[in-house]
Image (cartoon, rainbow, N blue to C red):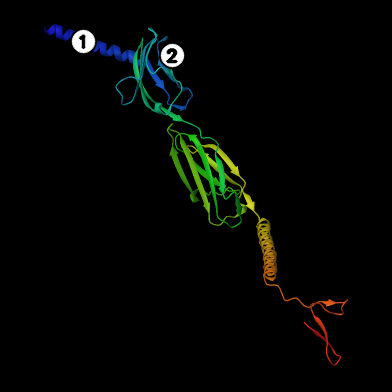
Amino acid sequence: MASAVLLFFVLMVMSVRDGKSEKSLFNLKCESAVGVISQNTNIPCSIESQKKPVSINTVVLKRLGQKKPCFVYQPHENTITGDTRFKVLGGSSLQLQNTAISDEGEYEYHIRTSLGEDLIKFTISVTAKYNNPVITSVPEKIEKNGRAELHCTASGGYPAGTIHWFDQSNTNWTKSASLDITRGDDGLHTLSSTLRFQSFDTLWAPFKCIVLNNKYQEEGRSSFILERKDVSETTVGNNTMTNTIAGVVVIGSLVAGLLVALLCRQRRVQHPLPSEPQYDEEKEGLEGSVYKETADGRQDFSV
């Protein structure tokens, strides 16, 4: 009985030693990867071994914190289980197709070969480049020393980045701006920055809007030359308004005078003046009069 127990212990020690010797001949190395959304992401891995060639039996990929593997590959049987977007390339390297934001995280990579097995961890980070920023101003034409707002918007990026403002002399105005970050249903971010001025100096233009990713690397920029509202333009506008008002006053006066004239004429028609007697040249008298001769020979005209 004792001899049987001793034999079992020796065999167990030998198996452990053999396992260690096999493990020392096989080492797996992988690099963390940065993937771009909707593109393929390569995870470079390599096998370091004192014995060659090395035959791979099983590949198991599992997300950290999850019990169930997300990808299992057995090359001898040519079977794949789990997420078919993963592929084994070049022996031990991996590729993730159509990368999504949900793929971001830490993974455990377990590989079993003819020389033993090894496990290593790596991380997949996901990025998406922001679209080129667009700058607008309120108002569109800015008057010197007037109020103004500059708006810069960049969308379609991941992770969340930031926006910086610079004027024509490369002075940084970012501290005076407000930044708003929104995340869409697709997980991508939109950056919106607003730079406000109580008194704008047109000599500061043009302004530059620069988009930076989460690592403060530039991903895009736009310049905007402001349309300046000149004093002459304002004067022309005021003169036009003045001339318009003057024309309205003149026309109004003419209309009022015409109305007064029409009113006076109407009153004269309703109330005519007494008619004066008219002289009749044939009778050398007044029309409507009666000619009489008095007893003393005098002539008399009576109406």
- Left or right, 39 with respect to 252, comes to left
Residue drawn 12% across and 8% down? 2
- The front one of 47 and 265 is 265
Residue located farthest toward the left when viewing the structure as drawn: 1
Lower position in the chain sequence, tag 2 or tag 1: 1
Q: Secondary structure at mark 1?
A: helix
Q: Nearer the viewer, residue 26 or 219?
A: 219
Q: Which residue is mark 2?
A: 91
Considering the numbered disc 2 on the image, is that residue within a helix, a strand or a loop? Answer: loop
The residue at the point 21 percent across, 10 percent down is 10
> In the drawing, does residue 122 fall left or right of residue 201?
left
- Amino acid type of the residue tagged 2 in the rendering: Gly
Q: Residues within 10 Å of mark 2 (few under 14, many from 20)?
A: few
Checking the image for residue 176, the label placed there is: none
Screen quadrant of the C terminus: bottom right
Q: Residue furthest right?
A: 282
Q: Residue at point 54% right, 39% down? A: 133
Q: For residue 101, which quarter of the picture? A: top left
Taking depth in this image into account, of 53 and 148 the one nearest to the observer is: 148
Vertical placement of residue 229 versus 56, above or below: below
Disc number placed over residue 10 in the picture, else none: 1
In-image side of 124 versus 241 (left or right): left
* Quadrant where the image shows the N terminus: top left
Report how many numbered discs are placed on residues in the image.
2
> x%, y% of residue 76?
38, 7
Most distant residue in the bottom direction: 296
The picture quadrant where one finds residue 126 is: top left
